[in-house]
Image (cartoon, grey):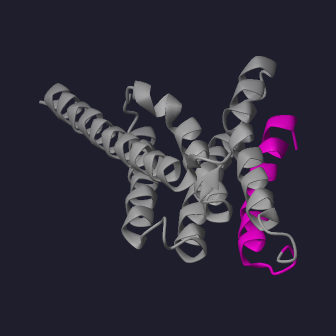
Amino acid sequence: MNLPNSITLARIACVPLFLWSLSTHRFASVPGRQELVAAFLFLLGSITDGLDGQIARRTGRVTVLGGLLSPLADKLLVSTAFVGLVYFAPELVAPWIAVVIVAREFLVTTLQSVATQEHMELRYVEIGKYKTVVQAFSVITILLAHAWPVWMGDVPGILVARAGIWLLITVSVMTSVASLRFFLAEVVRQLGGEM
């Protein structure tokens, strides 16, 4: 097992730990500790997103296993976070929000998988590069606002969290539409080439 794949597996390991941190009563004695642990685990998982790929490319250790595991790890972490937050912080994360986020993750993954199998070239959506940062910001602000609705005396944490959610929804919809458009354009191009 090479280093990039080990980093990817560490990201997958963050998924059950994140869920455990949201569901355990072990931290109930100290207000906010549960949210801080969950935020740390999600941040740790988010930092490893991209790090594994960069190391693999720099060291020449790109593998088929890594190419399959890394996107899976990303989808698992984000999907689990938002489904878990629907139950943990329902006042901030409505079920429809989780559906939009999870649907985006699986739509884009499906399009990429089909494109790879059919030897299509899909252009990378530029805004998608910032998706991981927006996801981390959104999840962490939701967790912090759940523990502390007001930050540093007068910053409305709940409003910051809601702004993060809407930013993520916007990025998710934009990247979904762009990915679908690029995929359909590539299908049309390939069908045109076969005629």
Q: Is residue 187 above or below residue 192?
A: below
Q: Is residue 150 above or below residue 34?
A: above
Q: Position of residue 77 (x, y in %)?
A: 64, 56
Bounds of the magenta segment = 1-27
Residue 77 visible in the snapshot = no
- Furthest residue toward left: 195
- Furthest residue toward front: 153
168 relative to 29 in the view: left or right? left
Q: Quadrant of the N terminus?
A: top right
Residue 105 visible in the snapshot = yes
x 52%, y 56%: residue: 158
- Furthest residue toward top: 58
Please tell me in which quadrant of the rendered image residue 176 appears. top left
8 relative to 194 in the view: left or right? right
Q: Nearer the viewer, residue 113 or 147?
A: 147
Q: Nearer the viewer, residue 86 or 34?
A: 34
Q: Position of residue 157 (x, y in %)?
A: 57, 52
Q: Nearer the viewer, residue 42 or 1?
A: 42
x 68%, y 43%: residue: 46
Q: Quadrant of the C terminus?
A: top left
Is 20 in the magenta? Answer: yes
Q: Main secondary structure of the magenta part?
A: helix
x 42%, y 72%: residue: 95
Q: Position of residue 137 (x, y in %)?
A: 59, 43
110 relative to 40 in the view: left or right? left
Is 170 in the magenta? Answer: no
- Furthest residue toward bottom: 25
x 44%, y 46%: residue: 163
Number of marks in the rendered image = 0
Please tell me in which quadrant of the rendered image residue 193 appears. top left
Q: Position of residue 191 (x, y in %)?
A: 18, 34
Q: Nearer the viewer, residue 24 or 31?
A: 31
